Amino acid sequence: MPIFKRYGREITLRIRDVMSSPPITVPEGAEVGKAVSLMWEKRIGSVLVVDEEGKLTGLITERDILYAAAKGILCGPAKVNDIMSRNVITADPDEDVSTAIERMKQANVRHLPVIDSGGRPVGVLSVRDIMDAAALFMRIISRLE
């Protein structure tokens, strides 16, 4: 869906324009504590889990950590493989942001890994990224009035 359409011109906002990059990743065998430390240090709500080739295999979010803690899984040396979300919904960097937002709403997720054609993460589109872009547009629009 175009953001602006007038006299045949369209401006489409692409995921690459608003995603956070580079992505923060951990290897499949990393301990959950490593992922939590990265999330704390970077002030982010998720980290991407990658295999030896750098391909996305999962996603670990604040929600995954909370559920694991509630089930007592974190009492021992848990690995990210034990609690990560698998079968992650992903996006292409050239995809339209409005399409990605719809996908995020339908799946009830706040983080959408952005991958290249080889399955390697290039960024993450989060609700925070979307809100930052919306705030920027609101500032621009308010200056036009």
Image (tube, rainbow, N blue to C red):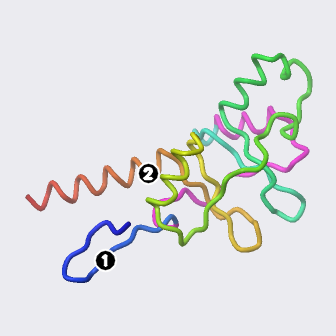
Question: Which residue is tagged 1?
Answer: 10
Determine the residue positioned at 57% across, 38% down. Answer: 43
Question: Which residue is tagged 2?
Answer: 130
Determine the residue positioned at 65% across, 32% down. Answer: 62
Relative to 51, 62 lies left or right:
left
In the image, 41 versus 90, the foreground residue is 90
Total numbered badges shown on the rendered structure: 2
The three-letter amino acid code for the residue at tag 2 is: Ile
The answer to the question of whether label 1 and label 2 lie on touching residues, with beta carbons closer than 8 A, is no
Q: Residue furthest front?
A: 106
Relative to 31, 92 lies left or right:
left
Disc 1 from disc 2: Cα separation:
20 Å
Mark 1 crowdedness (10 Å alpha carbons): few <14, some 14-19, many ≥20:
few
Residue 114 against residue 117 in the figure, above or below: above
Magenta residue span: 16-40
**Residue 55 rendering spot, x and y as whole percentages:** 81, 62
The three-letter amino acid code for the residue at tag 1 is: Glu
In the image, 141 versus 90, the foreground residue is 90
- N-terminal of the pair, mark 1 or mark 2, is 1
**Residue 92 rendering spot, x and y as whole percentages:** 61, 67
In magenta stretch: residue 73: no
In magenta stretch: residue 22: yes
